[in-house]
Each structure stands twice: as structure tokens, then as C-alpha cells.
Image (spheres, rainbow, N blue to C red):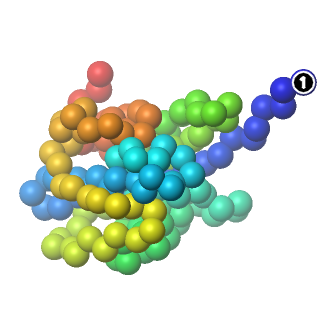
Amino acid sequence: MFKRRSPRHIAAAIVQRPDGRVLLLKRSPHHRTNAGKWSFVTGYVKKGEPPRVAAVRELREELGIEGTPTRAGEVVVVEFNGRTLYIHPFLFPVGAIEVRLEREHIDYTWIEPGEVYDFDTVPQIDEDLIGVGLLPNK
């Protein structure tokens, strides 16, 4: 008998420079999910933690920067490996930052939001951009 795994909530921090470009991070080949794919700063929402707080925490943990989201997008639902994931996207405007890669990522790039389709990304990443108003609805 197949037991469906419980859904998980993930916070996504979309980092945007004043010139409109957003940060994409390439996941390590050893990453537990979507290894080698491009993504935003993401992380699981802890039990009892608001997704917004999780996004701020993940930004601090993964990039070493403090940020405040200015916009929250609609929740994006992704089915992945027999589990439902609820992605909570947040937009974080930043000034000039130094991107510091840690063990989860091996590369980064700044792109115009519409260029996301040119990259091998995690599923439905464009919906995160749509949700925070950086791409038009499909």
C-alpha cells in the first residue's frame, strides 16, 4: 500500500537588484532535490514558522544578508516525488550585495526575469516570478 507523504511548505526568496535583475543560484550536484538545477534562495518552513519569517531566515543562512520582503506572491503548488509542495514566494529588493556561495550552490547569475526560461530550473519557478509581479500571467 502506497502512503502519500505529507505536504511541505517552502519559502522562496526572490532577490532583485535596482536594475531589475534577479538572482539565480545553481544547486550543487549533491543537493537533495533538483540537483544541478537553477533556483532562488529556498528552504523549508519550520513547524509553526510563518513563511515570511522562513524566507528571511533562508536569505540570511544562504547568502549571509539581511533583507525585508516587499511583496508576497500567491502560493505555487508543485507535485514532486509523490509529495505536494507549497511554495511561498517573496520579493526582496537589495542594493549592491556580494553573493557568497555556500555548500548548497555552485554558481550564480543575475538575470532579467524573462530570461528564466533560458535556464534549467526547478519546477514552476516562473510562477514564483508571476506571483510577485515580475512576469506577466501566462
**Picture layout, residue 87 above or below residue 28:** above
32 or 88, nearer to the observer: 32
Residue drawn 63% across the image and 33% down it: 81
Q: Quadrant of residue 110?
A: bottom left
| Quadrant in the picture for the C terminus | top left
Give coordinates of residue 78: x percent, y percent: 54, 33
Q: Nearer the viewer, residue 96 or 28?
A: 28
Question: Which residue ends up furthest to the right in the rendered image?
Answer: 1
Q: Is residue 80 left or right of residue 66?
A: right
Give whichever of 44, 48 is nearer the camera.
Answer: 44
What residue is shown at x 21% (from left), y 74% (from top)?
A: 97
Q: Position of residue 43 (x, y in %)?
A: 52, 58
Classed neighbour count for the residue bearing mark 1: other residues with Cα under 10 Å, few (<14), some (14–19), many (≥20): few
For badge 1, the amino acid type reads Met
Residue 96, position as x, y percentages in the image? 16, 73
Q: Which residue is drawn at the image coordinates 45% and 62% (left, top)?
A: 104
Residue 9 seen in the current view: yes
Q: Residue at x 84, y 26 (%)?
A: 2
Label 1, on which residue?
1
Describe the element under mark 1 as helix, strand or loop: loop
Residue 94, relative to residue 16: is it above or below?
A: below
Residue 55 in percent (x, y) is at 47, 62
Farthest-out residue, front: 29
